[in-house]
Image (cartoon, grey):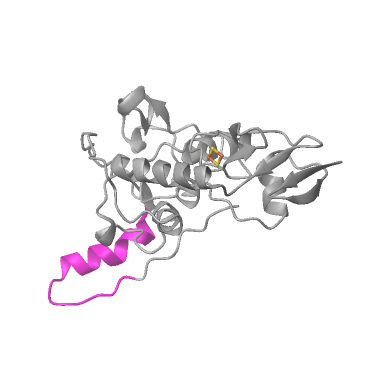
Amino acid sequence: MGKMTIDGRLVEFTDEKNVLSVIRKAGIDIPTLCYVSELSTYGSCRLCTVEDERGKTFASCSEVPRDGMVIYTNTPRLRKYRKMILELLLAAHDRDCTTCVVSGSCHLLELAQRVGVNHVRFQNTRELQPLDDSSPSILRNPNKCILCGDCVRMCTDIQGINAIDFAYRGTDALVTPAFNRKLTETGCVGCGQCRIVCPTGAITVVSDIEPVMKALADPQTIVVAQIAPAVRLA
Ligand code: FES
């Protein structure tokens, strides 16, 4: 049990595992991409960054709450950082958003719009990677992956399957089955839990894609595809 000051308000906490949970408990909206409360904390996107009274910044999802903390969640500096982070993520991402299978339910795009990104100043320098359509139920598009690792932790922490993981480093980093194999060459059981946590169109399942494929196969028919919105865990 303790108390901390968030944006000038005194907030009590009990057993919250991180500062982000205390912020959310106080009803303050803070953007996150890589945090899923049911999974282990990875702290890669840095969107949840907050500032303390000395101007020190840290990712709130990766910090344990301490009694007497004073933090700010929405300063001009933080708003600038968040905008820049989202701009960089969009820049390293295949941006065929209007025809993307998750158009309308993409968490990345929703956050970018929410923080006011209306222009991406950077070029995408990543080489396009082949899609993995080997699985009868799951389509992997590495060009839309933002390396949040949510799918990896879901596949390993919760499902215990370990079909996918991080590979390579720096700008070559990828989430892929080991040795860049196809999903069908792994223990993937097609459960689709990775799709539930994916914040972009990097992982989609057959029910997302089928209406689009039908529309493409029959040019005489105008089919309005109904894409189910991704169910995002907290
Ligand atoms: Fe905290 Fe991504 S949500 S670093």
Q: Looking at the picture, tell me which residue is in the foreground, 151 or 75.
A: 75
Q: Tell whether 149 sits left or right of 130.
A: right
The percent coordinates of residue 141 (x first, y second) are: 30, 44
Q: Is residue 40 visible?
A: no
Position of 87 relative to 178 (above/below)? below
Magenta residues (range): 205-225
Label count reads: 0
Question: Where is 220 relative to 183, above or below?
Answer: below
Q: Residue at x 49, y 31 (%)?
A: 162
Please state the horizontal and vertical placement of residue 120, each as a whole percent of the image. Answer: 29, 48
Residue 28 visible somewhere in the drawing:
yes
Please, is residue 159 above or below residue 215 in the view?
above
Measuring 69% from the left and 39% from the top, which residue is drawn there? Answer: 18
In the rendered structure, the answer to whether residue 40 lies left or right of residue 161 reads right
- Residue 227, magenta (yes or no): no
In the picture provided, is 229 more to the left or to the right than 71? Answer: left
Left of 112 or right of it: where is 153?
A: right
**Quadrant where the N terminus lies?**
top right
Quadrant containing ligand 1: top right
Q: Position of residue 229 (x, y in %)?
A: 45, 63
Q: Is residue 227 above or below residue 116?
A: below
Viewer-proximal residue among 136 and 198: 198
Residue name at image x 40 percent, y 42 percent = 84
Image location (x, y in percent) of residue 69: 75, 37
Toward the right, the furthest residue is 1
